Structure formats: structure tokens, C-alpha cells
Image (cartoon, helix red, strand yellow):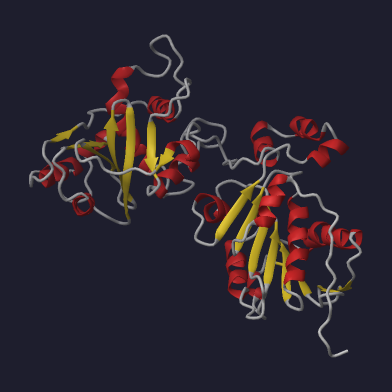
Amino acid sequence: MGGKRELRSVKIAYQPLPSQRRFHNSTARFKGFSGPIGSGKSQALCQEAIRLAYVNAGRTGLIGAPTYPMLRAATVAALVEALEKNEIPYKMNRAENLMVLGETRSKILFRAVGDFERLRGSNLAWFGLDELTYTSEGAWLRLEGRLRDPKAKRLCGFAAWTPKGYDWVYERFVANPVAGYETVIARPFENRFLLDQIPDYYERLRNSYDERFYRQEVLGDYLNLHAGKVYYAFDRNQNVEELAVDGGKAILWALDFNVDPMCSVVAQRDGEEVRVIDEIVLSRATTQEACEEFARRFPRHSGGVVVYADASGANRQTTGKSDVEILKQFFRGGGWGRVEFRIPTKNPPVRDRIALMNAKLAAASGNRTLKVSRRCKELIKDLEQVSYKEGSQIVDKARDPKRTHLTDALGYLVWREFEGKGRPMEQGRRLL
């Protein structure tokens, strides 16, 4: 009775899809499974929980969902079905919302994570969260802190979700994953088992959902569903690269005169291509402070500097002088070679400027002649998240005060550099 318990080798009746297999094979401390509905997310979550309960025999894990009704109806039901299908013994204590596996004596806690302050408690060997995009970042971080069982053989936190726009899940798991994170993104229509049972499953959804919701829920795309995306041609995988300063080419510095934040982009041009190599974002700053930060990052550059800005910069003031006067006075100090100011007396129509930006991001021919450095994280957020007000073609500047400033600054640069090449729909060809 007191001896070490022998564990049998358990063979699971489970044929993982390619994306599910990649998820299970991941050795990351924190891993995610992102995919459209019907991609097998709940199955992957439950199978990973069973595996970790056996690897960490006798230890405690946790399965969570946003609410108890969601947890009971979907996640726990899928787990129980998998256990019973494979004749894995378990005991459920519904009063305490926990399960004990018969062979391993491993405990599985079931928790709704809406009130993450209640997640304090004992150490965990593993945890898994279903529908992570409906969960707060605070809940995830609280569970990260509980993943500290010193007797665990494999510490792991994992989650499954359907995309829900550019939220904290996208930022943490997809856009800018930190060390120790890995995410598997399932492809649409991959679930052959579902299609064998219901061949017209996705066609039914196409008839039920509008186009953008269909793209999110069925294709698994990350979209901003609040309104139309302004820079729809931007693709993080194709427009973002590792970029460095070319000492032989002029630095192109474009500013948006805004006090909080004061934003500007630093770029260079190579023929038809614009390469954004850096961004400067300062909170509650003046134009003079932006100049000082520019000088700190680019103290000398013999290739020269070209300055771009909003036409109103000749009149606007963040201090006593106009913003353009401050810029001109700053560059009289020398050290950057020839300095040129390409600031218009009148701004272009917003619609035309945006159209030209999209044409540079991705022309109809497929050419992408606007590239962004990976270090420009706020500009990338702008390109992905700036949207129109719902039901209009007016750029929404009120939804997030941090957004639109960097893309506006870049738009001034692109317009001045390429307006002579013909506006969209001119020259007898379609540019977008």
C-alpha cells in the first residue's frame, strides 16, 4: 500500500491534426493554440491537460475558462468525454470543482478566471485556459505566477482561442512573444474529421456571417472588427523586416506635431522603396525635445537629412516659436550634411494620402515598396489598428489617443516623395 504506484502506459484514441501535433510537440513554457472555430482547439486543450496530468503524476493542474457556464458546458464536457472514451478513471468533486485522476492521483482544478484575484493559492504544475481572448491579461499573469511547483516534471501554461482583434492575446502571443512563448496558428479547413461529418459546415457559416466576421471566426484572421481598417494593405509578415541605417543615403525624418505623444518616424529611400528604420515616441514632449532625441540617436550623418511634417507646423507651437522654426534652428548646428525641409503649404486630402500609403504597402502588382523595421513597434500597431469610424470613411482618432500619429507622419513623407508619380487611379492603371 505504501509502495510506489505503478502507472500503466496510456494509449489515447486521438489522431491530432497537423496544427494540434505542433502544439503538443512544443516544449515552450507558455504556448498557445490560435485557430478558427472547428479547428480542434478544445480537443487540443483537453489532450494537453491529460498528458501533463500524467507527466506530473500526483501534482495539481488547473483548467480555466472565462465563466463557469462556459467551463462546464464546453471545456469540462470535452475533457470528460476524452477521459471516458479512453477508459481513464477519474473522480469528480463538483462541490469543490476539482477532478482526481485514478491512476496518477493528479488533481485538476476547474476555475472561472473572470475574477482573477481569486486565483491566488497553492502552486501549480500546469494550467490551461480555454477561450483566452475572452479572459483578462491579469488572469493569465496571475496563473503565470502560480506555475511554480518544485516537484513538477514539466511546468507549462497553455491556452486556446479564436482571434478577437488586436487585443492583449495578439500582442503577447503573436505580435511580440517574449522568451518562453510559442504559438501555433491553425489553418482554416484543416479539420478533415469535421468536414467528413458535415461537408457544408463552412459554407453554412459563410451564409450566416458577414465577410469580416467570417474571416475572424472561420478563417482565423486577426482583424479589427470595430470598423474598417485604414491601412488594409499592411502585412506584418511581408512589410516588416530587419533594417539598418545606410550611411550613404539621406535620413528622412517625418514628424507629427502632437504634444502627447510627440511622434516621428525616421526612414531612408532606395529608389521606389521607403524603409522606416526607427520611430521616436515621446510622452508630453515639445518639438525641441524631439530634436534632442533625434540627435541622441543620430548624432552624425554625412548623407544629409530631409525633414517632413504637417503643413500646420509653420503655424503651430509647442513652445514660443513655431514648430518648423524650432526644427530649422536646431539643424543650423551642423553635423548632418545637407538639410532640406519638404513641408507643404497645404496638406493633401486624407483620402489620397491613405490611398498612396496602401499602394506603397502593397500595389496591385504585388510589389511592396514600404518596409518597416521590427523595432518600430508603435508604427506597426498603427498600421494594424488605425480604423475608420463605423459606417464612414473618417479616420477614428478618438478611440485610442496613441494611434494615428505615426502613420500620419509617415504619410506626409510618402506623399511628398511620391505624389509626382501619379495619384491612385491615375496613369490609366489601378494602383490599389
Front in this rendered view, residue 410 or 276:
276
| Residue, far top | 428
Quadrant of res 124: bottom right
Q: Can residue 160 be seen by looking at this rendering?
A: no
Where residue 117 appears, x then y in whole percent? 63, 73
In the displayed structure, does residue 175 sit left or right of residue 43?
left
Q: Is residue 422 left or right of residue 43?
A: left
In the figure, is residue 369 to the left or right of 108? Answer: left
Residue found at the very far bottom of the displayed protein:
2
Position of the N terminus, as image quadrant, is: bottom right
Q: Residue at x 50, y 36 (%)?
A: 388
Residue 175 to residue 11: above or below:
above
Q: Position of residue 136 (x, y in %)?
A: 61, 61
In the image, what residue occupies the spot 33% across and 53% down?
260
Q: How many marks?
A: 0
Q: To which quarter of the image does residue 60 belong?
A: bottom right
Return the x and y of residue 171 as percentages of the image width and height. Answer: 52, 53
- State the residue at coordinates (37%, 18%): 423
Q: 134 or 20, which lies in front?
A: 20
- Considering every residue shown, the one lying at the far left of the view is 333
Task: Decide if residue 422 is in sight here.
Answer: yes
Answer above or below: position of 110 versus 216.
below
Residue 270 placement (x, y as % from top left): 28, 30
